[in-house]
Image (tube, rainbow, N blue to C red):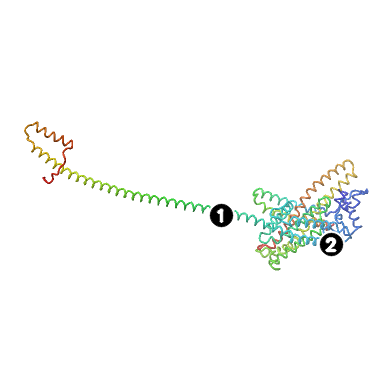
Amino acid sequence: MQHFTGITQVVVAAAAEDKTGERLPILPLWGELIFGVIAFAILYWVVATKVVPNLEKAYAERTAAIEGGMQQAEEAQQQAQAALEQYQAQLAEARAEAARIREEAREQGAAIVVEMRGHAQAEANRITEAAHKQIEAERQQAVVSLRSEVGRLSTELASRIVGESLEDETRRRGTVDRFLAELEAGNIQPEKVGEGA
Amino acid sequence: MTGNIAILGYGLSAIGPGVGIGLIFAAYINGVARQPEARGVLQGIAILGFALAEALAIFGLVLAFVFK
Amino acid sequence: MSLNVLGAISPAAAGGDGEGFHAPTPAEFYQPLIGHGDFAITRPMVVLAISVALIAWFLVATTKRAAVVPGKGQWVTEGAYNFVRNGVARDIIGSHDFLRFVPLLFSMFMLILVNNLFGVIPPIQYPTMSRIGFPIALTLLVFVIYHAVGIRKNGAWGHIKHMIPPGLPKGIYVLIIPLELLTYFVTRPLTLALRLFGNMFAGHMLLLLFITGGEYMLIHGGIGLKAAGVGSFGMAFVLTAFEALIEFLQAYIFTLLAATYIAGSLADEH
């Protein structure tokens, strides 16, 4: 507790040297006050003109960089989206084109088939017609030729029969056989009997 | 025993603000514990209340020097 | 170590001339280097000048080429700048017009912080703000600015009216008006300056007491007192760490209150 005596003694000692030190500590030294204002003004000037603008610029740049990066990414995404859409559009177009071509081909094929079938039918008809005509013609020819042959043969046969005296069976048979044999051998020349018949 | 009775005055003047500051920060801790997301708002208010309460102790300190 | 801490401590305490222990006194904070009286060049002035030069150099050097991707120095500066800009200015004043006050608050914060920390940094170990002149200088600026801002926004009469909360019964105004005026013109600046001064002054005094007392007990005491002296030094170390915390907190509070006062003058509604 004797410390308090110490306080007063030192205060007295200090007072002897310089009255200013004894002043109440809550009363300012004018020199210090003014110097404080000046020092702060200098620091404020430095901070306001040199430090804060640079920092704010860096902040703004940083914000811009981040926003720019985001914008860039957005643009890239938009481009990719556009490319995708374009690709899909092209794909759809190609598909439609392919479908159209296929449809066309099918139609063409069907048309060709129909056409070919018509052709074939016409050809077949024509061939059949021609065959019929030929057959008819041949038949006519055969009929004509047969008719003349039969006439000639009949006259031949009749002349033979009439020419020979048909005395006996044997001779009669013999005549017929001879005739047939001759006929087979081809010795009998066809003759014109048509004028007689 | 010699000394300055003004120091006793300062001691007395420090009691009230001491209790007050304790209450302020107790409430602050309580608030933050209940709602951690309100920390930013509460911090400013707590510091402001702390400063106001402390002003009384500072007056005591000043007067202790003035009435020597 | 004690010489560093004490600077020009009175020879009685250091030398121990047999008169007993001399506790540190407020008079020891007055350390004129050149001349004497009101306009002497004192030690805190030199410390303040050094701090201003140091802060200005550091800030300019780290932000001269402020890059989008910060370097180490710029990162440190930006940490402090962000703390003041976003944590104090924008939160308190509001995002509309806080940018005007950022240089003021930032330089104030840096100046107080560095000068306070000089109280525990070894080669200097003198908190400038324990001389009342410097806190008063800063407070004077804050006082002028928050009134000027209010007058520019609302006009002189509007600024006065702005201080009085509206919508109270008539009778209460008799009580409220003097109180509010007292708050705005006396209490606020007074406490703003004295809080900073008081914390730095008392904290440094405490350190002085523990260190000089410990030294005295070690040199002049018996066995028991020597042990107490060691304990005293230990306390000095603990308190030094505590002081560092207080010093940061005081810089923050001063800036925060300055921002609060400015915001109060700018606010539209009371």
Query: Mark 2, residues whose alpha carbon is within 10 Å: few (<14), some, or many (≥20)?
Result: some
The residue beneath circle 1 is: A79
**Residue sitting nearer the eye, A189 or C13:** A189
**Residue sitting nearer the eye, C184 or A122:** A122
Please state which amino acid type lies under the numbered disc 1.
Gln
Discs 2 and 1 lie in a common subunit: yes
Q: Chain of mark 2?
A: A
Q: Chain of mark 1?
A: A
C236 with respect to A109 (left or right): right
Task: Name the image quarter holding residue A22.
Answer: bottom right
Q: Secondary structure at mark 1?
A: helix
Task: Name the image quarter holding residue C39.
Answer: bottom right
- Specify the label residue C250 is tagged with: none
What x and y, as percent, mark residue C225?
87, 43
**Residue sitting nearer the eye, C13 or A66:** A66
Of all residues, the one furthest to the right in this rendering is C17
In the depicted structure, whether residue A183 falls above or below residue B45: above
- Specify the label residue A31 is tagged with: 2
Q: Secondary structure at mark 2?
A: helix
Please state which amino acid type lies under the numbered disc 2.
Gly
State the residue at coordinates (91%, 57%).
A17
Query: Mark 1, residues whose alpha carbon is within 10 Å: few (<14), some, or many (≥20)?
Result: few
Task: Name the image quarter holding residue C173.
Answer: bottom right
What x and y, as percent, mark residue C7?
87, 52
Structural distance between the alpha carbons of marks 2 and 1: 69 Å
Image quadrant in which the C terminus of chain C is located: bottom right
State the residue at coordinates (66%, 48%).
B33
Residue C20 visible to the viewer:
yes
What x and y, as percent, mark residue A18?
90, 58
C269 with respect to A49 (left or right): left
In the depicted structure, whether residue A3 falls above or below residue A33: above
